[in-house]
Amino acid sequence: MLKKITLIFISLAIILTSLEAGTSKRKGTAGAEELRIPVGSRGVALGGGVVAEANGVDALFWNPAGASFVNKSAEAMFSHVSFIADLKVNYLAVIANFGGVGVFGLSLKSLDFGQIPLTTVDAPDGTGETFSPNYLTAALSYSRRMTDRIYVGANFKLISERILRESAVGFAVDIGLQYRLESGLRFGAVMKNVGGNMRFDGPDLEWGVVIPGSEPGAPVRSLRVPLQEFELPAAFELGFAYNLKVGEAHSLTLAGSFQNNNFTLDEYKGGLEYSFNNMLFLRLGYSYVNEADYIFNSPSFGVGLNIPLGGTLEASVEYTYRKVKFFNNNQFLTVRVAM
């Protein structure tokens, strides 16, 4: 079995090297960039390098394979982040464990842009009206423990974007794998946001015009502007993690990953977590892109607290602070309930 897993990771590495790597020239040419916005305080606190470490409901975003590494019947989480440029991101996810059948999950991510002044050609300073774009991503997830070491999972995403009366709809899939050893060493890989192109369309792209030079009374003709399709921000990520027990009450987790992006430069992520009695968690992480002005080349710090509520019921509250260049720093708050 170990040879088969090794072969799988070698094959994934070959896929990684054969993918069209992103460059700084390709930035801004993909759409649906909300798919790349991270959710969940723990993963961000560890620099985002948790492709091999994420588990339970928290794994749905990072690597759906880890959702089946859970000993609870059900888990739910809500995460909120004040992102850049006054953008708010809310995320809600639930999973249900059906034993040998697998783990099923649902998640919903929404973006709150606030109220934006409406401008037109005739009123470039604003009409006095406002609007708010509506960006929503819903996902159905499935994860299963194939053996005592191998976990697989997938997300099936519906992507909806609406600006005024124009909208775009797309579909994407994430496919993940985790390999966990009893020694505490773990490996993970995931392909994210693989799907077809999207394109905006709507009634505001069509209007009536009179052909210049036409005689008086000439009929009004319909003019429609077709918009260009855009690709999704696909990525491939490969990582490892190691969990070390230090006595009965203490443990350390080291996690890291490499992410190849189709439309931007490669990312290097890593972090360290200290756990006391599996109740108090202190976290430190860093993500790096080889670009001087990359706004997320910065450290992140986090803390988590597990709260037993009696029986099998427990809750956790997690907070992460991430420094950001040029914008306000990010603050992530996550609440999780398990039973």
Image (cartoon, rainbow, N blue to C red):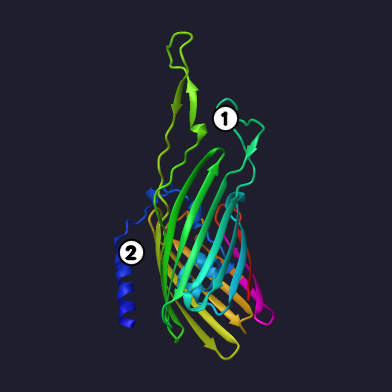
The answer to which image quadrant residue 188 occupies is bottom left
Name the dominant secondary structure of the magenta segment.
strand
Residue depicted at x 33% and y 82%: 1
In this view, the residue in front, 103 or 88, is 103
**Residue type marked 1:** Thr
Q: Position of residue 209 (x, y in %)?
A: 48, 20
Work out whether residue 47 can be spotted: no
Determine the secondary structure under disc 1.
loop
Question: In this figure, what is the number of numbered marks?
Answer: 2
Work out whether residue 98 can be spotted: yes
Say whether residue 181 is left or right of residue 334: left
Disc 2 crowd, CA 10 A, few/some/many (<14, 14-19, 20+): some
Say whether residue 307 is left or right of residue 107: right
Residue 16 numbered mark, or none: 2
Stretch in magenta: 303-323
- Residue 205 drawn above or below residue 294: above
Q: Position of residue 43 (x, y in %)?
A: 53, 68
Q: Is residue 321 magenta?
A: yes
Residue depicted at x 51% and y 49%: 160
In this view, the residue in front, 209 or 274, is 209
Label 1 sits on residue: 120
**Residue type marked 2:** Leu
In this view, the residue in front, 233 or 48, is 233
| Residue placed furthest toward the top | 216
Whichever of labels 1 and 2 marks the residue nearer the N terminus, that label is 2
Q: Position of residue 25 (x, y in %)?
A: 38, 48
Q: CA distance from mark 1 to mark 2?
A: 45 Å
The answer to which image quadrant residue 3 occupies is bottom left
The answer to which image quadrant residue 19 occupies is bottom left
